[in-house]
Amino acid sequence: MMPLSIFSVNLLSGNLLLLASILVFAAILVTKVGTRFGVPSLLLFLTIGMIAGGDGIGLKFSDFSIAESIGHFAMTIILFTGGLETSLSDTKPVMKQGVILSTLGVFLTSLLTGLFVYLLLGKYLGPIGSTLTGCLLLSSVMGSTDSASVFSVLRGRKMHLREQLGPMLELESGSNDPMAYVLTIIFVKILTVASTASGAGSMIWTGLGILVVQIVMGFLVGIAVGYGAKLVLAKVSLPSDSLYAILILSIGFFADGMASLAYGNGLLAIYVSAIVINNKAEIPHKKDVLKFFDGMTWLMQLLMFLMLGLLVVPSDMLKVALPALAIGLFMMFVARPVTVFLCLLPFRKLSAKSKIFVSWVGLKGAGPILFAMYPLVVGVEGASVIFNIVFFITLISLLAQGITLSPVAKWLGLSYDEDPEVETFGMEIPEEMGMLRDHTVSEDDLIRGSTLRDMSLPHGIRVMMVRRGDHFLVPHGSMNLQVGDHLVIIVGESDDDLLES
């Protein structure tokens, strides 16, 4: 098929919006197919991008600098949304496990994989594989689990895991980028700057110092901005509900920027600030705000993975398919499991089955691919090999691990079915008003009579809405109920309770 040169991607081209709309439309449609067969949507987005790229339809996009900037922007929103949906009460019990996995875990995974590549596969990888430093650079780029992939798979499939594995895995993926990022920078600097053993040693110590500063300052800035947002949200009254979501998003960007100015990690800062905002601040119209961020996250994931798919040239990727497959399998079945069992060894209450599952959730995705762009941007010799290998391993990870997470969790007995979500018909109820319950009318409910009054509901319980088929009915005492009607019930203090007190 001849490439269609009129479709070369140019950010100033009049065709850009037309092409983007077609790709986004196609990507959204294929998610329905993916849902039916259990294929992660992110894998489908990548595939659509590859099909549309140079070896497919002919769309050409090869500006890694722009791609890296767009990718970072998308990751900030994805991580911010992840933080806004993270419960601190769920995360606190697994804080130590998550932090150890996101720091020591990334280091050990990178070290084991780098040694494996250097000893067994280096001669097949050109300049990058000729030195231990180059092999460690390759493994460091892939050392972290990808937050976009983990959040998408765990939350998109509404997986409910025992032993608080969900919060631990999300915490790990949301906070392990600084370690992988700094390790990548260290080895890039050694390859491009340091020419002597003493210079390399100095660079390593400097890199360790950078790592500490990145994590500490990123964490502190995130905490400070989060509590600052709490004060702002308590004082500011906006004329439009939609403006609250935009205000909170701007606060997230502020956390990222301030962390960069303070030599901290912006992605960690934005994740921490979002956790603080969600758990400590009163967010007006919180349900609508979270819906806004959920939509933004889907858009960012879609655009980012489509863009990454456009960047790769499948014919180049296939040239490194065999060593990439070997590295991917080693990471899945050796490096990640060994690392997880070592890091979680002190936590004896965590079952072996849980550790096996955590080992399997070593999902790769946009994060490692974005890190793989950095050596390309700075001109490391042989960096294109790193990019192609990382991309190939990401495809393997999403295909093998992403598809099988639910079956593996069930096989290990670690997943369970949660009670069905209460149908609120779009209504947002303040927590202080009480708890919502969803009740389906049964024959037993109608034994005393068919009206709502005949149900003799206890004090403190009120029916707010009745849904019958596709119709929504306002309840009243003489309403005749039918078996199968859905009642939205609020459980709280009644006026009688207040009078008695």
Image: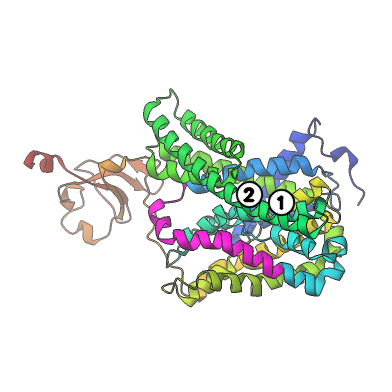
Determine which residue is flagged by label 2: 210
Q: Up-down: is 73 above or below 209?
A: above
**How would you classify the magenta stretch by its main secondary structure?**
helix
* Extreme residue in the front direction: 198
Q: Quadrant of the C terminus?
A: top left
Res 52 seen here: no
**Quarter location, residue 205:** bottom right
Specify start and end residues of the magenta stretch as a single range: 85-113
Q: Nearer the viewer, residue 184 or 477?
A: 184
Q: Residues within 10 Å of mark 1 (few under 14, many from 20)?
A: many
Q: Earlier in the sequence, mark 1 or mark 2?
A: 1
Q: Up-down: is 445 above or below 248?
A: below
Element class at badge 2: helix
Determine which residue is flagged by label 1: 185
Q: How many marks?
A: 2
| Drawn side of residue 66 relative to residue 97, left or right | right
Marks 1 & 2, CB-CB < 8 Å contact: yes
Q: Position of residue 440 (x, y in %)?
A: 31, 56
Q: Residues within 10 Å of mark 2 (few under 14, many from 20)?
A: many
Identify the residue at horizontal 49%, vertical 34% (top origin): 248
Is 135 contained in the magenta span? no
Q: Position of residue 398 (x, y in %)?
A: 66, 62
Q: Which mark is residue 334?
A: none
* Extreme residue in the top direction: 239
Q: Report, in whole angstroms, how far the alpha carbon at label 1 lies from the one at label 2.
A: 10 Å
Q: Position of residue 252 (x, y in %)?
A: 53, 37
Kindly identify the amino acid type of the residue bearing the numbered disc 1. Ile
Kindly identify the amino acid type of the residue bearing the numbered disc 2. Ile
Q: Nearer the viewer, residue 446 or 425?
A: 425
